Image: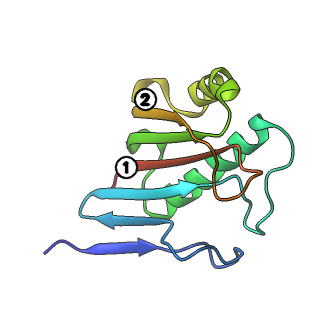
Amino acid sequence: MEKITRYATPADARPFPPFSMAVAHGNTLYVSGLAPLDTAGNIAAGDFAAQFAQVIANLKLVLADAGTDMTRILKVNVLLTRAGDVAEMNRLYRAAFPAEALPARTTSVVVALPVPEFLLEIECVAAVG
């Protein structure tokens, strides 16, 4: 039976709803939807670009905690609350993900996320080990 490892929020972070930030099973890491919050629970101030940057910073932290990185991401789901942010998201995404290791991706525009101020959320599946 393959080992399952659960990754919680960072020790210094504000408590989050009841879920694991990521769960590894075998050589696969499933990362929960990450929001534009810093470890103190503050929403990234400013525009879509600031929120995107915070989500990517959070993603890098979760991946590093699990012993992997952006080049090992297999699949990404991007949830946006505004269709008008798709072009900006593509521009920022291209800069955030290594060109030689672009993962498969789905982008959806949703009616709302759990916190009305969130403009996006990103979840992914990555290889570990």
Q: CA distance from mark 1 to mark 2?
A: 12 Å
Residue 27, given in percent of the width and then of the height, sits at 26, 58
What colour scheme does the image use? rainbow
* Residue located at (58% from left, 55% from top): 34
Q: Is residue 17 left or right of residue 127?
A: right
User: SS class of the residue under badge 2?
Assistant: loop
Q: Is residue 75 above or below residue 19?
A: above
* Above or below, 68 relative to 85: below
Please name the amino acid that badge 1 sits on. Ala
- Please provide percent x and percent y for residue 105: 42, 33
Tell me the SS state at disc 1.
Answer: strand
Residue extending farthest to the front is 111
Q: Quadrant of the C terminus?
A: bottom left
User: Which image quarter: residue 76?
Assistant: top left
Q: Which residue is mark 2?
A: 102
x 13%, y 75%: residue: 1
Q: Closer to the N terminus: mark 1 or mark 2? A: 2
Q: Is residue 104 above or below residue 21?
A: above
Q: Which mark is residue 126?
A: 1
x, y percent for residue 80: 61, 38
Report the front residue among 3 and 41. 41
